Each structure stands twice: as structure tokens, then as C-alpha cells.
Image (tube, grey):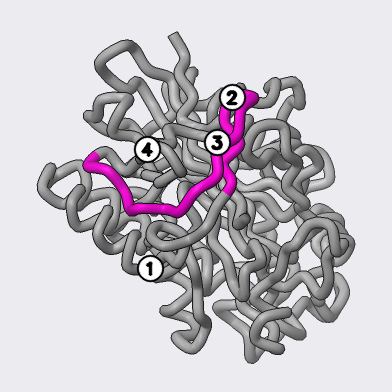
Amino acid sequence: MTRDSRAGAPAPHNNPPREPTDMRLGRIVRLLMEHATVVVSGTKIAEEISSSRSSSGRSSSGQSGSGRSEVWRLIQQLRGLGVDVAGHPATGYQLRAVPDLLLPEIVAPLVSGTIFETDLHHFYKIGSTNTAAMAAAAEGAAEGSVFLAEEQTAGRGRGSNVWQSPRSTGIYCSVVLRPVLAPADVLVLSLAVGLAVKDAIAQVDASVNVDLKWPNDVLIDDKKVCGILTEMNAEATRVRYIVVGIGINVNQESFPAELNATSLRMATGHEWSRVELAGALLKSLDREYRQLVRDAGVRESILRRFAESSSWVRGKNVRVDENGSAIEGTTQGLDERGFLRVRTESAVRTVLSGTVRES
């Protein structure tokens, strides 16, 4: 059976994923980056992509329009996606600026040595990376598979909430994990992901003051900058697979007031490299995950570090909406499983799920 560690039922998975990015585009970008100071001929680029296979599994050299004309078509496609490439078939090509695209060829070198380095999937546009990752996991996708998108048309947050996912401004990332864990322990993993996000942001800019809100929000100045969506397929006593979705607002310049959201750019006043942050995120997540699955004793450390990193875990006056009912009280820390304790007028209640708001 399927269990979901979020509050409320999961949103329907009714948005089919789009086709993954043509792998040749990433290879072209990587080649131009490696030769950033010179002009690269169309012939050299054609040789590079003809030695690989396209995302459809067919040899690109066997497709119609191969050679320099095919390179021109792909260059035009890159330009349409916002990549600033100078030149034309007669003179060759050169990048005017390094693109901040989460292409596997760009991200993979940053996560070398992690479980995420070998199976990265990129989409320019997709419904939801979590939907794609859940479908792939059901078909046997390997642990460490990563799904990255420049844009989501149906990004999902907690419950039935929609995650705003404009093109190439945020990080929209889902990973497949297959831990030897009981379903009851998955909450601790979600808390560890929050710690990984906090650490990744600090690696890029240590001056950013990040707050963790139980169970899966990351805040700056009481506004949401990141959401974590953990979904799993499990039996009664063991997890089959988990998909962790992470959405980070990176370079958005504004949000509707009703969203109470911010971005790293809005919070710091400068533009961020999504590539650098994505690399830091996957490295931090790899470290937290490996420690959790290898050492059962690290769970106490995760709970302690989460509590130390959160203004919401202890002493916060909150209202909790859970399963159609609501309670109000003051947070009293986490129990040994990672659930939130709230002292009401009559007793200390354990919050298993639900929406927590400041009261």
C-alpha cells in the first residue's frame, strides 16, 4: 500500500511528465564552457554530439539533418531557451555568458562522489518533478536518481497547495531514495532534508539567517523560501521507496502578497547561481542521508540540530489545523520520533501532521 508522510492526502498524479531535455543540448553547453575563450566550430560540435546518443536512445549521427545543420538547429534551440550563444555555422560558436541551467553535464561534476552523480534527469518544462520521480521509482529507478526542471506547470506543495515554479528562477528538484527504514522513521528524514537545505544556503552565503519550520518549510524573515515534499511507497513495516521534492525560491524578484514567500535574491539583494546552490544542496543531502541510514544513533543528532535551527519547535504560540480540527498552544519541542509537541490549556498534545501557524 502507499503511505504518505505529509499532512492530508497527496495531490492526484494526473499531469504526465514532459520529454526530458535532449542530452545533446547539455553536451553542447558543456563543450562551449570547456572552450570558453575560443570559437568552437560547428564541425567539432557535430563530432561531439554524433559520438553520443540522444535522449530518445537513437544515435544522433543517424538522424536526418545531422552535421553542421543539426548543430545550427540545436544552437537555435538553446538560444530560444535563453542561452546566450554567439556565432553562426560559417564562423563557429562561443558562449557570451555561462548559463545558469541545471543541466546534468553542469551539475554532475559538482556532486562527484555522492549517490546523485550518475543518474540526473533534466527537463526544461514538466508538470511536477515529484510526479516524474514517483513514476520512475515505481518502475525501478535507482536510488540517487535526480529529477531537475527549469519550470514546473503543476508543482505541488503540501496537501493540495500549488508550488509556484517560474522558468529558471528557482530550484525544482526531486530525488529517489530507497532507505532501509520503517515508515514511522521517514519524518526524521524530512527533518534532515531541512537541515541539508539550510547548510547548502550557508555554503553559498553564510550571512543568510535561515529558520526551519516544522515539519518541512524553510523560512527567511518569517517568509517561505523553500518547501520540502516527501512522498513514499511503503508496506506496513518497510519503505519501498521515497521521493523527496525540494523547491527553493532562488532568483524570483517578487511574489503575490498572499503567498507570504520570499526568494534568496529578495532576501540578500543579489542574484544567486542556481547551479552552485543545486550542487551544494545535493552534496549536503547526500551527507545527511548517508549518516541517517548508516547510523541509527544519528537520529538524536538530527532532532537536536533541527530544534536548534528552528524558532518554531519550542516556545512558539501556534495554531495547528489537523484533520479538520484545530488546537492552540505553545510548542514544547520534538518527541523521540520527531513529532511536534504542543502544550494546550489542558494537556501536552503530539502533532502527527497538519498545518502549523503562528497564533
Q: Is residue 199 or residue 325 the one in the foreground?
A: 325
Please indicate whether residue 81 sits to the left or right of residue 26 in the image: right
Secondary structure state at the residue bearing disc 1: loop
Residues 139 and 39: in front is 139
Q: Which residues are magenta?
A: 319-336
Considering only order in the chain, which callout, 3 or 1, is on the residue closer to the N terminus? 1
Between marks 2 and 4 in the image, the one whose residue lies nearer the viewer: 4
Q: Which amino acid does the dot numbered 1 rest on? A: Ser
The total number of labels drawn is: 4
Report whether residue 28 is seen.
no
The CA span between labels 2 and 4 is 19 Å
Q: Label 4, label 3: how many angstroms apart (C-alpha)?
A: 18 Å
Number of residues whose C-alpha sits closer than 10 Å to that of mark 3, classed few (under 14), some (14–19) or many (20 or more)? many
Q: Are marks 3 and 2 in contact (CB under 8 Å)?
A: yes
Q: Is residue 91 above or below residue 195?
A: below
Instruction: Give whichever of discs 2 and 1 has the lower sequence position.
Output: 1
Asked whether disc 1 touches disc 3, contact meaning CB atoms under 8 Å apart, the reply is no
Task: Choose top left, top right, bottom left or bottom right for residue 350.
Answer: top left
Q: Which residue is mark 4?
A: 347
Real-space Cα distance between discs 1 and 3?
Answer: 20 Å
Q: Earlier in the sequence, mark 4 or mark 3?
A: 4
The CA distance from mark 2 to mark 1 is: 27 Å
Residue at numbered disc 2? 323
